[in-house]
Amino acid sequence: MLLFVYQSKFKIRFQKEFCNWTSDNHDIDQLIQQIQLNASIFKDIIEWIPFSKFTNIKYLVKGGFGTIFKAVWIDGYIMGFDDQKNVWNRPLQQIHVCLKGLDNSKDIKQKFLEEVKNQYKHGGNSAVAIYGITKNPKDGNYIMVMEYAEQGSLRKLLDNRYNELNWASKVLNLYHIADGLNTIHKAKLVHKDFHSGNIVNHFMHSPYITDFGLCKPVSQDSTSKALFGVLPYIAPEVLYAHGKEYTQKSDIYSFGIIMSEVFTGYPPYHDISHNNELAIQICYGLRPKIRCEVPQLLLDLMNKCLDADPKNRPTAKDLVNRMDQFFCNLQNENTELYKQVKDLDNNFLSYDQVKLTQFKYQTHPQESHKLFIQVDF
């Protein structure tokens, strides 16, 4: 998206237009208006978008609290202002967007507003951009309108294009994911739902974090006894405490699981049922199988992320630094990592040499990788 200087006269124009639209909810109106008045550049604007402005709406996936759709936004986002025509400048062509609806959001809750705020705060840097909010006239539920990632989720990318990823590509993707997580942690937040389905890619090496529905401040304790999340990514200490011990180090554990996916291409525990028995096994030390050869330096870092003791796990900042170092080392034939990768490439049993044209695997009938589940002990 192009950046334009955001002048005070545009704030006045927005203010004059406040009477021309409403979401039928005071809190949402106030949030959008506040963002429009405080934005310093055009890319920071969000809008109330009438549902009639969307066409070709297609279902993508159902989550734990809502549903994701792909759609065409007829107008597109604001890019500037045409003084001669006295209208907002928008893209010359229609754009694809992602519509994320929150179930039962017609009775607006603080949860929806907080998710919008977090998506907005991180959008464009560590997370996909949010363009605005709309409302489904059929059920009255509110919907976030977000940037559409052409490659889909990281899980989809691994399923469809894993054979195109060399070790430098894998490390580069993990670097960007770690950088996004570090941005969230620097804001003193925990994501709490960090998995490959909530990471999306515009291109091969451009991952962005999404779904801030469970994101909470570090200082905010959980009072719920229910445990929500995608089971394979939930840290053992969270399983023990029924979700009450979720910290930034729990996000790091989730990152370690994502590392195992990127390294091997397989979803974690894809061949066993995701149930209470798996939760118990994770608490007793079960971790995803590494089904191919992985450079030992990368394996060591992954295992640190998956340590049963949260104190032994690295920070997100540590991960950014290590991934940056690893990527540089892969370009230098004198480094240990370069030699380890070279040894794997020369090994005829290397996974990269025997993988099929299209990455395939069998999943357990009760495997629920893409479902948002509740686990009770």
Image (cartoon, grey):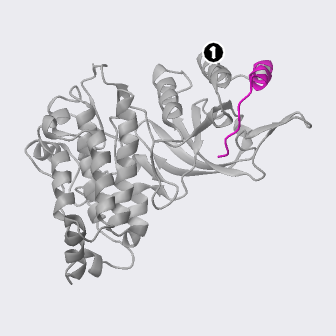
Give the percent coordinates (x, y) of residue 126: 46, 42
In reply to whether residue 9 is colored magenta, the answer given is yes
Kind of residue indicated by mark 1? His
Extreme residue toward the right, this view: 84
Numbered disc total: 1
Q: Residue at position x 25%, y 38% from top?
A: 315
Of the 4 image quadrants, the one containing the C terminus is: top left
State the image quarter where residue 345 is shown. bottom left
Q: Horizontally, is 47 left or right of 66 in the view?
A: right
Q: Residues within 10 Å of mark 1 (few under 14, many from 20)?
A: few
State the image quarter where residue 167 is shown. bottom left
Q: Which residue matches tag 1? A: 26
* Vertical order, 159 against 372 (above or below): below
State the image quarter where residue 186 is shown. top left
* Vertical order, 50 against 61 (above or below): above
Q: Residue at position x 75%, y 48% from top?
A: 91
Extreme residue toward the bottom, this view: 348
Element class at badge 1 = helix
- Residue range in magenta is 1-16
In reply to whether residue 377 is colored magenta, the answer given is no
Give the percent coordinates (x, y) of residue 222: 28, 22
Extreme residue toward the front, this view: 334
Nearest to the observer: residue 150 or residue 139: 150
Give the percent coordinates (x, y) of residue 252: 26, 41
Q: Residue at position x 38%, y 64% from top?
A: 169
Q: Is residue 185 visible?
A: yes
Q: Is residue 103 visible?
A: no
Give the percent coordinates (x, y) of residue 37: 67, 21
